[in-house]
Image (cartoon, grey):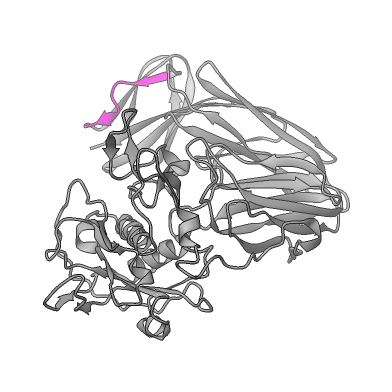
Amino acid sequence: MKRLHNALCMTVLLFLSFSVKAQVPILNSYPQATATIFLDFDGQTVSSPYWTSTPFYATPANLTTAQITSVFNRVAEDFRPFNLNITTDSNVFLATAPGRRQRIIITSYSSWYGNAGGVAYIPSFRWSQEVPGFVFANLLATSSNPETNAKRVAEAASHETGHTLGLDHQRLFNSSCGLSTEYNPGTGSGEISWAPIMGNSYSRNITLWHNGNTSCNGTQDELQIIASNSNGFGYRSDDIGSNLNQAPNVSITGSTFGTVGVINTTNDVDVFRFNLPDQGQLNVNVAPNNSTGGYNIDMEAELLTSNGSLLRTYSPSTSVSAIIDTTLNAGTYFVRVRNSSNAYVSNYGMLGNYTVTGTFMSGSTLPVYSLNLSGRIANEKHELDWSIIADEPIDNISVEVSTDGRNFTALQDVKGSLRRFVYQPMEKTTLYYRLHVVTASQLKYYSNIVSLRSVTGKGKFNLLTNVINSNTIVVNSTGNYNWRLVDMNGRQLASGRMTAGNNRISATTLSSGMYLLQVIDGTEISTEKLVKH
């Protein structure tokens, strides 16, 4: 039975005129595979009787070279575990045997079909005929953000490819078995938000193959269907061993290292060996492939001793990366990597590339033996406390902050003798903190990472208004404090001291834009955002 399926149409379609013509780069995700999906961006004459009785020309996608590369990378990542080559090369497609190949035409010509984001037949990959699927880039690439457009096109391309491989839509049903929505929109927010590829995955960060409902009482095991004998290509061979004896050694060059792996199946486990020549600080970042701006895996890492005993599991609840940051004695250690479920979705379908990168700072005698950071929320503020055991004086401590647990920026430098810092965030979000400690001999160390949920409330000062239409910022202060005005890149523009009561700060030199006013009381910093018109 031949079934026709179209992808989810955008709720609001803005029709834009595109004039950019790009050279399509030659890209292949797995050249040794015997099966091929061809992403056709540069236009194609369509004569298949399944689509038309009169041949027509599907115009080029009108995406930039960078967008084409991004679309390719996203689709390639969705199919990374399979013995399947995603290509932009028509010669590779034509050299692949019929019944082992599928063309997906990504085009700016949609009026022949309608307002859907794409369309394909189920399961045309298996038919040994030239029956392409379509993605209508002109109906999807409607954002002012080029990467958002690339994501939408890529999600539709993977969705339509899924149809050609035998997949139906992932739907939602109510308690009475009534259809709630044809396209499961997923759930969650932020980095770990999720949606099924065969649902509506345009706006979620983690998009996966899913084992979910296609009918009220029927489920679709998409990994089983894609890798089935009916499609004929299956999974790739596992690249990294799952036990200590098979673990590849991670070479440390200087103080850095890096390697890659693939989670091939839902239960795949990869193990890496680290031979540490001396006592030192080991920092390991296990991160899913993010060159595409989205993710296919939520990572978990375990640190093991030389005999396989578990030292600690690293699996942050709000981040897809797992970060190991600890001091270890000389010897052999193992890092065991797997996918992980999160608050919104199980680990089913969390497959694809990941990287293992980091640093090891070696030394026969470590000036800092112990560096431990802890945090809590009290009185609407973030209170950070730390302990340091060291053989030499601490020259400087920088408190660093991050919104994703990976990319940190300096928040405040404090004296090496201090062991406490208090901060009042300006927005409600989870913040991650760590310390960057520099000893008298200029050796550098990082503490463990703590996460705290930001709160808002009454602080040490209030702005009369956050929107500045004049050349004066009016501040009501509860006491005498130092203040500084910084731009959104953290560059200090002005500073001074305010007194209890009303204060007037000149905004004459400020151009239109967004700024931060920070009030400093010892080790406490309170921040408010303001906009100058």
Residue found at the very far front of the displayed protein: 1
- Nearer to me, 344 or 493: 344
Rendered residue at 59%/44% (across/down): 340
Q: Position of residue 439 (x, y in %)?
A: 75, 44
Quadrant of the rendering where the C terminus is positioned: top left
- Find residue 122 and report its image quarter: bottom left
Decide which of 349, 165 is in the foreground and name it: 165
Question: Percent from the top left, x then y, of residue 498?
Answer: 43, 22
Visible residue check, residue 118 = yes
Q: Answer whether residue 256 is magenta in the image.
A: no
Front-lying residue, 228 or 314: 228
| Quadrant in the picture for residue 524 | top right
Q: Position of residue 177 (x, y in %)?
A: 32, 33
Q: Is residue 22 above or below residue 268?
A: below
Vertical comparison of 61 with 406: above or below: below
Examine the structure image and report whether residue 468 is included in the region drawn in magenta.
yes
Residue 445, can we see it?
no
> Considering the image in quadrants, where does the N terminus appear?
bottom left
Q: Residue at x 32, y 54 (%)?
A: 148
Highlighted range, magenta: 461-469
